[in-house]
Image: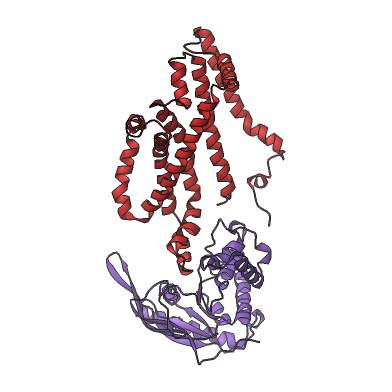
């Protein structure tokens, strides 16, 4: 048996090597990036803005490169990465557990759902200073804020995924005397995995937002802190833009990592 | 050697089985004081009109569905829930789509806590028995309907049940595939000597496979006739046209017609 891939299915399309496919998939991304940079440069040139209001792409690119080579951005970057990953682990873990609970127990769903939704609707921006006030500005409260913000989409995705497991598969498990635990780990979670990972796709980008918001609430390291410093005491607007790009790139990189994990875990015809 | 049907030990014994379902607030009786005995190594087919409770009966025997009244015994001990001595094959293959065929067939053994090496060896053995050995690494979406149902049969056989229950197992397949699988089922039975109870819509399938064909009345279902098929074993598809089969099929057909007209009257 050979696996039928979308490539072999599209037999009508002319055969293309892997290299050609990369070019075909990537050119829209690169093209849009080039367009963005051109428009940005044009706005700066036409408006004749000074670099401390809106620096042009070239100045930002230079600042980005020497920010990394001089070691200005690096330590802040790694602080943020650590917060995001820990926050995702805590928030994602709690989200999956609560999602399973909500899917399993109607009473739990009735009791918890309104409050979980209400908590999600409260802006994290308003909660961050409170959390900093209560727990300080250290790693713990930053991880907590990241965890809070990515908890919701992962919990909801898990709940929906587990509720939509085919009841015939549950009955199959029952006919083989599966325990409650086996039902969860061998049938429900594998079956809901596409939805759960969909929740992680959203959660990972929100975790980056959470980390920056948490860093704004205080502390001395992290990309959010760097933005504050660049805008305030350093008054280095190109550095602020370089930090913004670093944050965006971090979000994209983490998202792509989740997508790569998804591709590894889930078969295409699942 | 072909397994001898001996009547000194009942594989399955059902006494006074009743079961109803609540549908839109009212109680709908599906099985009514049903009696059933199946001897060890016997093959029994259950036929009946649509909605007569055939599938419900099979679920009660498997222990998946507790009866409202009555008792279910397998080899003289009560069946109180899903039972390791009883294997069930559903109408659909119900394979786990994220597992390959080997892992699907090993699934019941995995749930029972059998070590990996041992359960995979056993799964490969059953796959050979069902002619699926070359498909061990295939995924369910790569299998034809017949292959998928074969894998479901292999999975039910993996824990070596004494009793195999089949709920219209081949009804979704085309006629040719179905005949071939019926033939293979008989040769599997020849090798394992498992007691088999199957529910089917096809009179010819029922007669070809079984020692006895039981006919159920329309809802609430009871067993109203018991037709013996005296054709010798081993049976093969080439013998289907012979008199013994067609006599039994005629008897089943006319009894079914009577059962249904009694209801209509």
x then y, percent, for residue A253: 55, 34
Depth check: give the residue in front, A260 or A14. A260
Q: Position of residue A145 (x, y in %)?
A: 39, 35
Identify the residue at horizontal 44%, vertical 35% (top origin): A206
Q: Residue at x 47, y 78 (%)?
A: B47
Residue A168 appearing in the image: yes
How far across and down, in percent of the image, does residue B27 sit?
29, 71
Q: Quadrant of residue A20?
A: top right
Relative to A243, is B58 above or below?
below
The one of A259 and B118 positioned closer to us in this rendering: B118
Q: Looking at the figure, which quarter contains the C terminus of chain B? A: bottom left
| Above or below B89: residue A221 | above
- From the viewer's perspective, is A262 left or right of A233? right
- Which residue is nearer to you in this view: A119 or B15? A119
Residue A153 vs residue B17, the one in the foreground:
A153
Colour chosen for chain B: purple
Task: Identify the image quadrant of the N terminus of chain B.
Answer: bottom right
**Residue B240 appearing in the image:** no
Instruction: Give the residue displayed 58% in from the left and 45% down from the top.
Output: A263
Q: Residue furthest left?
A: B25
Q: Is residue B135 left or right of residue A97?
A: right
Could you tell me residue B160's position as x and y percent? Answer: 56, 75
User: Color of chain A here?
Assistant: red
Query: Count the marks: how many?
Result: 0
């Amino acid at each position: 048996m050979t696996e039928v891939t979308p490539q072999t299915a599209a037999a009508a399309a002319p055969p293309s090597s892997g290299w050609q496919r990369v070019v075909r998939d990537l050119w829209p991304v690169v093209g849009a990036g080039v367009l963005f940079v051109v428009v940005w440069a044009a706005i700066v040139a036409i408006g004749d803005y000074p670099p401390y209001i809106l620096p042009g792409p070239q100045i930002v690119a230079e600042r980005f490169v020497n920010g990394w080579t001089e070691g200005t951005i690096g330590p802040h970057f790694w602080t943020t990465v650590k917060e995001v990953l820990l926050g995702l682990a805590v928030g994602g873990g709690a989200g999956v557990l609560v999602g399973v609970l909500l899917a399993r127990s109607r009473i739990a769903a009735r009791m918890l759902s309104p409050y979980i939704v209400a908590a999600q609707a409260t802006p994290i921006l308003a909660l961050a200073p409170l959390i900093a006030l209560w727990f300080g500005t250290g790693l713990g409260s930053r991880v907590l804020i990241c965890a809070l913000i990515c908890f919701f989409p992962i919990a909801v995705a898990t709940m929906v995924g587990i509720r939509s497991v085919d009841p015939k598969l549950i009955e199959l498990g029952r006919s083989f005397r599966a325990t409650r635990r086996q039902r969860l780990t061998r049938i429900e979670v594998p079956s809901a995995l596409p939805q759960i990972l969909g929740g992680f796709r959203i959660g990972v980008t929100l975790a980056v937002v959470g980390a920056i918001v948490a860093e704004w609430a205080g502390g001395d390291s992290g990309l959010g802190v760097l933005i504050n410093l660049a805008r305030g005491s350093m008054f280095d607007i190109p550095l602020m833009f370089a930090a913004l790009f670093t944050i965006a790139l971090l979000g994209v990189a983490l998202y792509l990592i989740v997508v790569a994990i998804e591709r590894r875990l889930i078969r295409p015809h699942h | 050697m072909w397994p001898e049907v001996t009547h000194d030990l009942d594989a399955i014994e059902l006494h006074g089985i009743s079961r109803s379902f609540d549908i839109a607030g009212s109680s709908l009786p599906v099985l009514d004081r049903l009696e059933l005995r199946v001897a060890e190594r016997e093959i029994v087919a259950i036929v009946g009109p649509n909605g007569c409770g055939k599938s419900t009966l099979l679920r009660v025997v498997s222990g998946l569905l507790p009866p409202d009244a009555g008792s279910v015994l397998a080899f003289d001990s009560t069946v109180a829930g899903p039972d390791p001595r009883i294997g069930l094959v559903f109408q659909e293959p119900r394979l786990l789509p994220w597992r390959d065929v080997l892992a699907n067939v090993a699934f019941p053994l995995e749930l029972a806590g059998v070590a990996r090496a041992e359960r995979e060896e056993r799964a490969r053995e059953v796959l050979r028995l069902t002619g699926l050995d070359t498909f061990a690494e295939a995924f369910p979406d790569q299998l034809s309907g017949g292959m998928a149902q074969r894998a479901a049969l292999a999975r039910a056989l993996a824990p070596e049940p004494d009793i195999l229950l089949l709920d219209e197992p081949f009804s979704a397949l085309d006629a040719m595939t179905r005949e071939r699988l019926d033939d293979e089922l008989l040769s599997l039975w020849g090798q394992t000597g498992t007691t088999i109870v199957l529910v089917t819509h096809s009179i010819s399938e029922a007669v070809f496979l079984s020692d006895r064909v039981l006919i159920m009345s329309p809802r609430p279902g009871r067993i109203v006739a018991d037709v013996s098929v005296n054709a010798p074993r081993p049976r093969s598809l080439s013998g289907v046209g012979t008199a013994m089969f067609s006599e039994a099929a005629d008897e089943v057909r006319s009894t079914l017609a009577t059962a249904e007209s009694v209801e209509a009257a």
